[in-house]
Image (tube, rainbow, N blue to C red):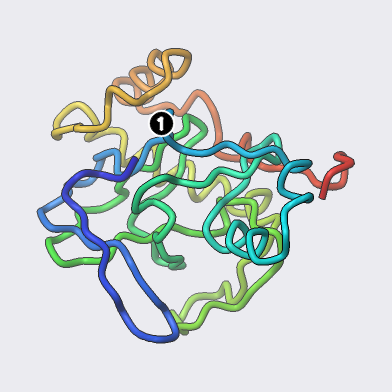
Amino acid sequence: MMFPHTKLRYINEQMGFGVFATKFIPKGTITWALDDLDHILEPQFVAKLDKPRRKFLNKYSFRNQNGQYILCWDLGRYLNHSFHANCIGTAYNFEIAIRDILPGEQLTNDYGTLNIGTSFKPISEEGTERKRVNPDDLLYFYKEWDQQVTEALKHFNDVEQPLIHLIRPEFKEKVMIAAKEHVLPDSIKNNYYNRSSKKQK
């Protein structure tokens, strides 16, 4: 589920749609959390779908560490990629704002965290050393992303958290530890889906 004070907006023909803040979202706010309305699809099921539906899933879903396809039921599926993302995923099935997000600003995440199927070069040149998003980016950039999450979680208990009720029970204690002690118990690297060790691709 997306942070409630957001809306879908058409950007242009190349980018399509994006998700934009309708109110100030402070650093440390949960901006998206997995909930029971999101679709979790097994690879075997997806493999049997017709080409148009597989294409849709490849565009609008991401894969978890088990290789399952996660299709968000709401605006979460429209979050665009940025190498300067203002939201980053965690090992706890939610994304967090890693800096303040102003009203009217687009929410973005780094697709390198999402176990994408194939490498791609983003439409926009962002002046970063990274020029492509790759399926194994989690193995190379997890330390940077973990640090951003750790810094954001320092503010976790000081900001409004409309999505806090969606944190899974098995993760709550770890999130509270990270917020209070500024140590991340689990790395986002845990989200990596190792295709080479799986039969399903």
Residue drawn at point x = 26 percent, y = 40 percent:
28
Q: Within 10 angstroms of label 1, few (less than 14), some, or many (20 or more) residues?
A: some
Nearer to the camera, 168 or 127? 168
x, y percentage for residue 178?
Answer: 38, 24
What residue lies at 28% left-to-right and 22% top-to-bottom?
165
Q: Is residue 73 left or right of residue 115?
A: left
Picture residue at 34% right of the left edge, 26% below the top? 166
| Residue type beneath disc 1 | Asp
Q: In the picture, which quadrant includes the N terminus?
A: top left
Q: Depth check: 153 or 33 in front?
A: 33
Disc 1 target residue: 35
Percent x, y of residue 147: 44, 43
Residue that appears at 62% across and 46% down:
63
Question: 184 above or below 143?
Answer: above
SS category of the residue bearing label 1: loop
Total marks in image: 1
